[in-house]
Image (spheres, rainbow, N blue to C red):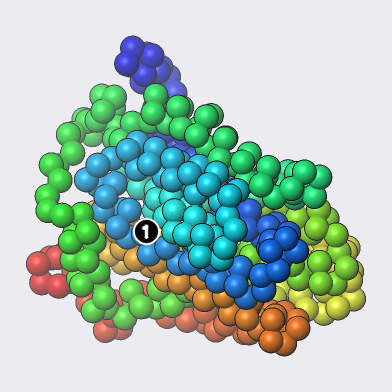
Amino acid sequence: MALVSRMARSRIHYGWVVAALTFVTVMIAAGARSAPGVMIVPLEQEFGWSRATISWAVGVGLLLYGLIAPFAAAIIERFGVRTMASAALAMIAGGYGLSTFVTTPWSLVLLWGVLAGAGCGFTATVLSATVATRWFEARRGLVMGMLTSATAGGQLVFLPLLAYITAAVGWRSALGLISGIAILLILPLVLLFMRDRPFDVGLARFGSDAAPEPPAPPKGNPIANAFKVLRETAVTADFWKLAATFFVCGFSTNGLIGTHLIPACIDHGIPEVRAAGLLAGMGMFNFVGTSASGWLADRYNTRYLLCTYYVLRGLSLLYLPFLLADVSFVGLSIFAMFYGLDWLATVAPMVRLTSERFGAAKTSIIYGWIFAMHQLGGAISAGLAGVMRTELGAYFESFLMAGAMCVAAGLLALTIGRKGSAGGRRADDMVADPARA
């Protein structure tokens, strides 16, 4: 396309165009993924379904969102970023558009959980990691942090709007808005301007002096390749430490706070729109926190960063039930600011640490498997917190359990990649000679 060729020859590297398109794609997916938190109470009221039933539908979506990640990385390698991003947007639009017609719990699981959850899975942080790795040699950590902050952007832009539309018009109109934006606004831009690699526009990666090189032709089945990489890395202790800490990350963020903070606030007499404003505020500070974390990950030891993030998150979760009990909106606003700065700050150091331990060539797929554990944690947390709320009548125990798990994850992060450990030696061997794994 002539326009793309002219843009590629401009003074601004085309990688920034691809990064911007990735940002808006991830942002709409984040807005779609945050919608169930606004919809839980309206669905309870309209259909009489229990909070546990609705929470499990959300949990299925979170689980698929994560389980698809390692295969998404392999499929991106085979079919390209543009194809996968376009398919993901179409699935999100279809899932949320059709869900306006649901009348049974199983249809909610099928559309929210399976179709929209799978679409969001293709736009997970694996997509951001692939774009950052392919297009940027310099500023890679910063770009990863900025792309991760798109999740915060989705919360910031969509949550208050969805809450307002739900309260004023109804939850069906709110879901229709998400579907329309995805299919009518963002999808055409991705089809027109997204490109898979710098070679496609005759460029090297940003910050690289090397000449543009064509990509190696894809080999093998992408699903088989994803499992092959898992077999090679699952023999290391560091892989499981990374996976365990990210399991806790998902358990404490999108599974618990992202799904249940608004219902928890409503339980304590805080109106729905105001509660959505708390999550939106988290999104605003998350934007700052994730971008800053990317900058820090380029300069400081990622183990120490992860430990700090997890411990601070754990302490804030341990304090949250007491803020809710006092119905202190000022205190909750401070919590939202603090928690927002920390929400996805773990991603950039996690991607960098994964690359350092296992090599850049396999980072996308390995991180995909680690991210699958993140979403497994989120799915379990979403469902478990719903069950505990139904059985115990409150979220008190859920918040305390998640806080304790975060503190433990922070201590575990300090042991990742230690020189002289069996896991560290094995990982180094694999990078040097993957055939030995």
Q: Quadrant of residue 179?
A: top right
Residue topped by disc 1: 69
The quarter of the image holding the C terminus is: bottom left
Q: Is residue 125 visible?
A: no
- Give the percent coordinates (x, y) of residue 211: 21, 30
x and y percentages locating residue 64 in the rendered image: 42, 63
Residue 223: quarter of image: bottom left
Of residues 405 and 65, which is closer to you in this image? Answer: 65
Instruction: Please state which of residues 80 and 65 is positioned toward the viewer in this rendering.
Output: 65
Seen at 80% across and 67% down, the residue is 265
Q: Residue 434 location, x and y as percent?
A: 14, 65
Residue 329, percent across and down?
A: 88, 64
- Left or right of residue 156: residue 295: left
Which residue is depicted at the point 49% across and 49% down? 95
Asked if residue 77 lies left or right of residue 67, the reply is left
Looking at the rendered image, the quarter that the N terminus falls into is top left
- Amino acid type at image mark 1: Ala
* Residue at image location 29% in from the left, 57% down from the top: 71
Is residue 311 depicted above or below 112 in this figure? below
Mark 1 nearby-residue class (10 Å; few <14, some 14–19, many ≥20): many
Give the residue displayed 56% in from the left and 66% down from the top: 105
Q: Is residue 306 above or below residue 46?
A: below
For the residue pair 3 and 35, the one nearer the viewer reads as 35
